[in-house]
Image (spheres, grey):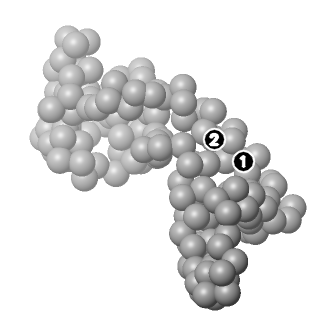
Amino acid sequence: MKVAQSTAKSRARLDERFSEMQPVARFTPPVRGWIKAIREALGMTAAQLAKRLGVSQPAVAAMEKSEARGTIELATLRRVAEALDCTLVYALVPNKPLDQTVRERARQYMRRRLTPVEHSMLLEDQKVAARDTSARLEEILRETSPRKFWE
């Protein structure tokens, strides 16, 4: 139970931080990548950036192409960011709140576990009320480790 509560608090804190990052479309990189866009906006040549990085100009061109393709390594991107006097921001931003995702998984988990029981109760003319199902979901969320929802 403590694990479920701790995980729920952590999820809520993350959801709060992620809400500040919406809409994520504002973080979409330029077509040619951030490196080239920022370098050019600063009026810096590839040769000048290469010198700051201690690499060759063709290496900078390769980095820019690699970033545009989405294959650049984070360590390389961090080095380039520092050379451009920038801060690399790296984040995985969920498409919907984490709590919503966990609740959806909990509903699926509950459905798998309760469908046979509900079927038996229905055969005995004892239908489960929707409010009972909703209350049971809340109970499962409070008492069950979310790890079980992903099995």
Left/right placement of residue 141 relative to residue 99 reads right
* Quarter of image, res 97: top right
Q: Residues within 10 Å of mark 2 (few under 14, many from 20)?
A: some
| CB atoms of marks 2 and 1 within 8 Å | yes
- Asked whether 10 or 84 is in front, the reply is 10
Q: Which residue is mark 1?
A: 10
Q: Where is 94 relative to 111, above or below?
A: above
- Asked whether 134 or 147 is in front, the reply is 134
Q: Where is 83 relative to 135, above or below?
A: above
Q: Quick one: quadrant of the N terminus? A: bottom right
Q: Where is 97 relative to 113, above or below?
A: above
**Type of residue at label 1?**
Ser
- Rendered image: mark on residue 14: 2
* Residue at 21 percent of width and 33 percent of height: 33
Q: Position of residue 142 (x, y in %)?
A: 79, 59
- Asked whether 95 or 112 is in front, the reply is 112
Tell me if I can see residue 35 in this picture: no
| Label 2 element class | helix
